[in-house]
Image (spheres, grey):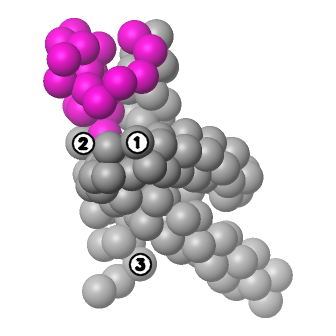
Amino acid sequence: MSRESLFRILAVLFFGAAGYHALAFFEPAFGNGGAHWRHAAFCGIDILFACYLMRRPKWLVWAFGVLTIEALWSHGTHAWRLWREQGRLDWLSFAVLIVVPCAQALLTRDALDRRASSSA
């Protein structure tokens, strides 16, 4: 599968995440917790990242790094708390904990390859 195809798939996943946050904003019982304002903010953030994943400006690897740290912290602590207190796996957080760092790695590789090809 080509790198461009992977970025398109990631963009679709981020649009899906925006949809999830929009639903959780309008119907709080749908979401698995989280502040109302946070769902609104991440609806916008996910849409922006979905669009930027298709264009991949030079600075995106750094901005996505911040998002990766935030996702690992928030979804990681939520998943750990749910496992510890209720003994169940939060599949959505589990997916985020896999997909977001993999996307960061792909973005980093892409940025390094672009830099190498522009300097050659």
What secondary structure is marked by label 2?
Answer: helix
Which residue lies under the disc numbered 3?
3
Q: Secondary structure at mark 1?
A: helix
Amino acid on which the number 2 mark rests in the picture: Gly
Amino acid on which disc 1 is placed: Glu
Discs 2/1, front: 1
For label 1, the residue is 85
**Residue at the image position 26 percent from the left and 26 percent from the top:** 31
Q: Position of residue 44 (x, y in %)?
A: 43, 24
Whether tag 2 and tag 3 are in contact, CB under 8 A, the answer is no
Q: Earlier in the sequence, mark 1 or mark 3?
A: 3
Q: Residue at x 29, y 30 (%)?
A: 32
Q: Are marks 2 and 1 in contact (CB under 8 Å)?
A: no
Q: CA distance from mark 2 to mark 3?
A: 20 Å
Span highlighted in magenta in the image = 17-36
Q: Residue at x 41, y 78 (%)?
A: 3
Q: Quadrant of residue 51?
A: top left
Give me the disc on residue 16: 2
Question: Is residue 28 a member of the stretch shown in magenta?
Answer: yes
Q: Residues within 10 Å of mark 3 (few under 14, many from 20)?
A: few
- Tell which residue pokes out farthest to the right in this image: 119
